Image (cartoon, grey):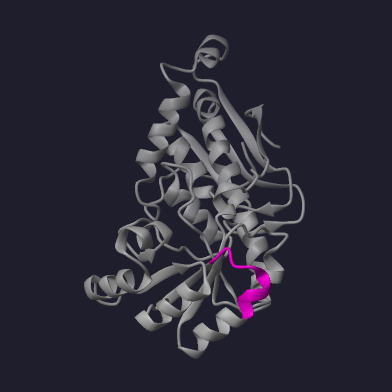
Amino acid sequence: MIDVALHPCQVSPLIPGLAEQVRAALAEDIGRGDLTTRLTVPPGRRAVARLLQKASGVLAGAPVFEAVFAVLAAEVAIAWLAEEGSAAAGPREVARLAGDAHALLAGERTALNYLQRLSGIATLAARAVAVARRYGVTILDTRKTTPGLRLLEKYATRVGGARNHRLGLDDGILIKDNHLLAAGGVMAAVRAARVGAPPGMLVEVEVTSEEQLAEAIAAGADLILLDNWPLATLPAAIARCRAAGIRTEVSGGITLETLEEVAATQPDFISLGALTHAAPALDFSLDFALETRSW
């Protein structure tokens, strides 16, 4: 037996579409069946396992990890020893599991892949938030996510303390450079968007020059995205927007190493595509043992 209280693995209702997402991932990995386990592990064999975080960082994705074993419809129980969103300065044990060895082996890689990916994103987000907070700046994520994993990756940025920008093209208006070319310029695009925007939805426009900035202010944009502006020009541009009562977002190739100097210019927001497209995985392992009376 295990010396902690276990509960059956469950699918969290708080993450939309989680069961379907996990089923697709398991189908990708298991395919026609776990051949190695079927040939080498006797049916009915039970096992226990420790889930170990092997590096410093933020735990994110615990509900997804647990859902993998719930979706397998097997008798697997879990006890979490660390809270979602908690940070550790070094290795730690974060959970214990017990149940059917076939199910634990079949779900191991998929569950770890989710946990490593989402914890890596949350860890990078937490580091960025810690820097930006000193200047009163909010960190935003972007749509630069892995296809099929957007909801989970944006969930991970929230766990790390960042704020979601748009989840998709249907829940926000952000007029970017190609929209401006197709629409006929900043003034035409912003005015058209303001006329057709749903009630309460802000109109944001990306500008890359002083001329576009002046047009965006004159057109009445609610939020101006200063994309790839030279650092030395940001304070004046931000001041112009602030004087007009317009909030600012800064983006464009910003990394954790360059974040502080950008945050020091004090825009309202800094958006970081790197949170989801460049976050390194956080290392975890699932260490098995045959079920015994104690650990």
Residue drawn at x 30%, y 59% as measured from the top left? 170
Question: Quick check: can you spot residue 230?
Answer: yes
The quarter of the displayed image where residue 283 is located: top right
Q: Nearer the viewer, residue 259 or 236?
A: 236
**Position of 261 compared to 153: left or right?**
right
Q: Nearer the viewer, residue 248 or 192?
A: 192
Residue 241, magenta (yes or no): no
> Is 223 placed above or below 140 here?
below
Question: Quick check: can you spot residue 73?
Answer: no
Q: How many marks?
A: 0
Residue drawn at x 70%, y 63% as measured from the top left? 258
Residue drawn at x 52%, y 75% as measured from the top left? 210
> Is 173 placed above or below 292 here?
below
> Is 99 placed above or below 182 here?
above
Residue 282 percent coordinates (x, y): 66, 45
Residue with the most extreme top position: 39
Q: Nearer the viewer, residue 161 or 243?
A: 243
**Position of 79 compared to 16: left or right?**
right
Question: In which quadrant of the rendered image does the N terminus lie?
Answer: top right
Residue 94 percent coordinates (x, y): 65, 48
Residue drawn at x 66%, y 28% as measured from the top left? 289
Residue 231, magenta (yes or no): yes
Residue with the most extreme bottom position: 243
Question: In which quadrant of the rendered image does the C terminus lie?
Answer: top right
Q: Nearer the viewer, residue 43 or 29?
A: 29
Residue 127 percent coordinates (x, y): 67, 61
Q: Which residues are magenta?
A: 227-235
Residue with the most extreme right position: 90
Residue 57 percent coordinates (x, y): 69, 53
